[in-house]
Amino acid sequence: MRLIQFDFIDIKDKETLHEYLAEKLDLPDHYGNNLDALWDCLLELSEYTLIEMKNIFSLYGYLGDYSAKFLKTLDDAALANSFLWLKVLE
């Protein structure tokens, strides 16, 4: 199983978020840096993957409504792909 840990404490804008996601998830070079592209990549996971997340509330201060859309994308992807699990730390 693959364990990926997200710490959102230093995420201050959408661009930084998507760069961070691309690095942590080892997304392909053609990753589109948007939620639709993230959705597509998460659905392609075929290895059991647990994503542990901390400091998710800091996203709201910088990203506002976008943080809720991002977290919903993760949640929906976990529901759609049985290889993906999410865990919130704190």
Image (tube, rainbow, N blue to C red):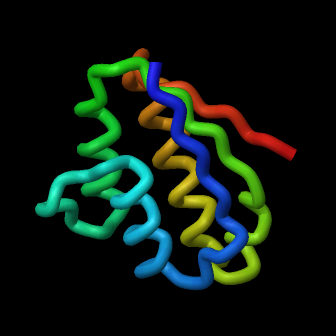
Residue 76 image point, x, y percent: 48, 36
Between 73 and 29, the one nearer to me in the picture: 29
Give the residue displayed 74% in from the left and 40% down from the top: 88
Which image quarter: residue 21?
bottom left
Between 37 and 1, the one nearer to me in the picture: 1
Residue 32 placement, left or right of 70: left
Give the residue displayed 75% in from the left and 80% down from the top: 61
Which residue of the protein is positioned furthest toward the left in this rendering?
30
Residue 20 placement, left or right of 37: right
Whether 90 is drawn above or below 67: the answer is above
Residue 7 placement, left or right of 29: right
The mark tally for this picture is 0
Residue 68 image point, x, y percent: 62, 60
Residue 52 image point, x, y percent: 64, 39
Which image quarter: residue 7?
bottom right
Which residue of the protein is positioned furthest toward the right in this rendering?
90
Which image quarter: residue 32?
bottom left
Give the residue displayed 58% in from the left and 52% down from the top: 71
Residue 78 placement, left or right of 31: right
Whether 47 is drawn above or below 28: the answer is above
